Amino acid sequence: QAAADLRERGLDVHAVAGHAANADSAAHLVDAALERYGRLDVLVNNAANMYRGPLAELDEQALLDVFHSNVIAAMMLTQAALGHLVQTAGAVVLMGSTHSQRAFPGASPYAATKGAIETLTGVLAAELGPQGVRVSCVRPGAVFTELNQRAGLFGDGEALARLEGLAPAHALGRIGTVAEIAEAVEYLARAEWTTGAVMTVDGGLGLGVTNA
């Protein structure tokens, strides 16, 4: 659907289904991009899933699954793309979360994966920098996406209402938009002297405003 929406705006978008945490699937995704566009300049690791619940009720397999989707997938897809990004002096953009800055009870599985992603950002930036590849991360605040709905936690209306309820916790008094996160991704993709950065784009949620 996202690809179709972008095509309606006149953009050249090619959608390919796959599971980035699977090495063969990750390679297929990279190959499809190369076949379509001839080169690879930027990899945005935006795929993720949500799992949450009180510590006493967490399931081991569900924990492994969310780490697989949120952390291992980013590592495997970056591995598959690396050789091509070296050729173009390209960039990798990862997606963190304000969950690494503010503690929300019951969200420990998701928060742990995003903390791992933000740590991974620095390690990969140091490792891949000598090869000319930049690695950075965007840390969003509350933004309405399909994450909770795809995880089966809430319907659209309830998911939006829960996020809107967080608006007062943002210093700017509202939740963000996907376009505002995309602006940060574009900057990191283009910024040739930026690597290892975790860019907070959260409307001030991470500041700890207490009038929520």
Image (cartoon, rainbow, N blue to C red):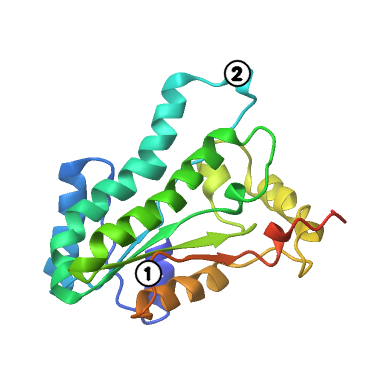
Q: Residues within 10 Å of mark 1 (few under 14, many from 20)?
A: many
Residue 156, image x, y percentages: 63, 49
Q: Is residue 61 left or right of residue 21?
A: right
Classify the position of the N terminus by image quarter: bottom left
Which sits in the foreground, 75 or 101? 101
Q: Secondary structure at mark 2?
A: helix
Nearer to us in this view, 42 or 9: 42
Q: Mark 1 falls on what kind of element?
A: loop
Could you classify mark 2 by the number of other residues whose Cα lies within 10 Å: few (under 14), some (14-19), or many (20 or more)? few
- Find residue 88 and report its horizontal and vertical position in percent: 17, 75
Residue labelled with disc 1 = 195
- Amino acid marked by disc 2: Glu
- For residue 72, the mark is none
Q: Using the rendered view, name the quadrant where residue 72 is placed.
A: top left
Amino acid type, label 1: Thr
* Dots 2, 1 in contact, CB < 8 A: no
Frontmost residue, 128 versus 112: 128
Q: Position of residue 14 (x, y in %)?
A: 27, 67
Residue 133: image quadrant is bottom left
Q: Does residue 172 appear anywhere in the picture?
A: yes
Residue at image location 69% in from the left, 41% down from the top: 104
Q: Is residue 106 above or below residue 41?
A: above
For the residues carrying marks 2 and 1, which lies nearer the camera in this image?
A: 1
